[in-house]
Image: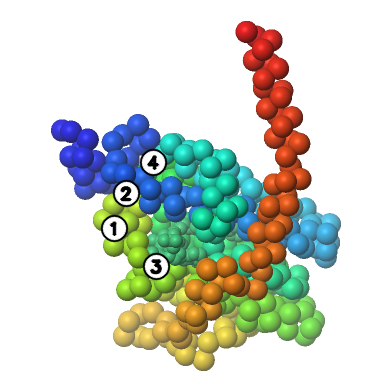
């Protein structure tokens, strides 16, 4: 079998495509786009939570939050490494992000106003991320699938710690419970937006499903997330801010209201509440870290010269 035929046969048989294998250029480009966007999301995603490290309510909460934020950096690294197996360098991907030519998840363009937001992010944002990423453990590209397995294990812990923060607040004073409700009110709809546009509006889904890069559609994953999260909100005694949310016995799923797609596209296109701040912070961190990169290169050059 030649390259294209072998590729099609591997996809049909649910086998993994590996870095040295022949693959269509569109498959390679789609993976680079998605994996890079995913990596950038992990890295930019450190900012909203990093915002609360100095203000975590106890030493224990602070230690847990620092570990979580470090985990996100690690996820970024696994994903940049997975993208590099497709023949693109991490420097190039970082450059594309800095020039606004690649995206990161819309969710990280919302501010973290109170400590309860840290709970809501763990519970809802990591919860949505796991829903999406569990499906991606079966993606057809081997290095991406394997990165997802490891990331999902860490994300489940993140989701639990977020839920536990919400539980503590909901069992606390009326003011603490109100803070938890306010965080849910602000993060619910942006969390649903993480799954992307409706299937009918999704540009890449059809081809990505054929190539088994995507295994479950945007709308199906969003529904799975809603179905899993509503009982969790009920247990907390919180109200999901959607008057149309209702169990539909015929479908065996919750019906829910329409996302504000104008807001989604505004945020995706750079005009969300925190887009400018997130990118300015990222660029400043990159510039401030220049001496570390220069020192690392100088050290590597010196070692190479010594061993030559
Ligand atoms: N935000 O054709 P579609 C985390 C774009 S981080 C921004 O459906 P696709 C965590 C999309 O890119 C988890 N843009 O696209 C970290 C496309 O534009 P381009 C991040 C979005 O790729 C720290 C256009 O809309 N997870 O866990 O087939 C703390 C049309 O969309 C968004 C991932 O990245 C969005 N929400 O499907 C806590 C998962 N949605 O590229 C937690 C991996 C869509 O043509 N990615 N767009 O310019 C995916 O699974 C898929 O890329 C998506 C979109 C489901 C997101």
Residues under labels 3 and 4: Cα distance? 21 Å
Name the mark nearer the viewer: 1 or 2.
2
- Would residue 118 be found to the left or right of residue 18 on screen? right
Q: Which mark is residue 26?
A: 2
The residue lying at 70 percent from left, 64 percent from top is 277
- Between disc 3 and disc 1, the foreground one is 1
Give the mark toward the camera: 4 or 1. Answer: 1
Determine contact: label 3, label 2, CB under 8 Å: no
Q: Earlier in the sequence, mark 3 or mark 1?
A: 1
Label 3, residues with CA under 10 Å away: few <14, some 14-19, many ≥20: many
Residue 80: x %, y % from top left: 53, 43
- Specify the label residue 133 is tagged with: none
Q: Going 78% across and 58% down the picture, which residue do you hit?
A: 53
Q: Which residue: 32% across, 82% down?
A: 251
Q: CA distance from mark 4 to mark 2?
A: 17 Å
Residue 265's x, y, as percent? 49, 73
Q: Residue furthest left?
A: 1
Q: What kind of element bears circle 2?
A: helix
- The residue where tag 4 is placed is 142
Mark sitting on residue 207: 1
Asked whether, in this view, residue 14 is left or right of residue 95, the answer is left
N-term mark: 4 or 1: 4
What is the quadrant of residue 4 in the picture? Answer: top left
Q: Assess mark 3: CB under 8 A from ligand 1?
A: yes
Give the crowd class for mark 2: few <14, some 14-19, many >=20 residues within 10 Å.
few
Query: Could you tell me which secondary element the residue under label 1 belongs to?
Result: helix
């Amino acid at each position: 079998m030649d390259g294209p035929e072998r590729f099609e046969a591997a996809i049909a048989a649910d086998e993994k495509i590996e870095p040295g294998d022949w693959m269509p250029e569109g498959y390679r480009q789609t993976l680079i786009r998605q994996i890079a966007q995913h990596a950038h999301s992990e890295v930019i995603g450190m900012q909203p939570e990093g915002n609360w490290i100095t203000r975590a309510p106890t030493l224990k909460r602070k230690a847990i939050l620092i570990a979580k934020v470090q985990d996100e950096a690690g996820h970024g690294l696994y994903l940049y490494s997975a993208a590099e197996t497709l023949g693109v360098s991490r420097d190039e991907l970082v450059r594309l992000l800095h020039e606004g030519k690649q995206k990161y998840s819309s969710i990280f363009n919302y501010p973290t106003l109170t400590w309860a937001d840290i709970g809501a992010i763990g519970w809802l944002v990591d919860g949505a991320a796991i829903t999406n990423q569990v499906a991606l453990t079966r993606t057809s590209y081997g290095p991406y699938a394997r990165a997802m397995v490891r990331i999902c294990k860490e994300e489940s812990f993140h989701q639990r710690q977020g839920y536990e923060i919400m539980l503590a607040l909901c069992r606390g004073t009326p003011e603490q419970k109100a803070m938890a409700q306010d965080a849910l009110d602000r993060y619910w709809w942006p969390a649903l937006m993480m799954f992307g546009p409706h299937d009918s509006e999704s540009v890449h889904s059809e081809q990505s499903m054929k190539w088994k890069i995507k295994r479950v559609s945007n709308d199906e994953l969003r529904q799975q997330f809603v179905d899993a999260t509503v009982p969790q909100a009920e247990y907390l005694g919180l109200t999901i801010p959607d008057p149309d949310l209702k169990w539909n016995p015929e479908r065996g799923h919750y019906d829910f209201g329409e996302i504000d797609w104008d807001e989604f596209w505004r945020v995706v296109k750079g005009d969300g509440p925190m887009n400018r701040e997130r990118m300015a912070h990222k660029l400043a961190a990159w510039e401030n870290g220049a001496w570390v990169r220069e020192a690392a290169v100088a050290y590597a050059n010196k070692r190479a010269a010594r061993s030559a």
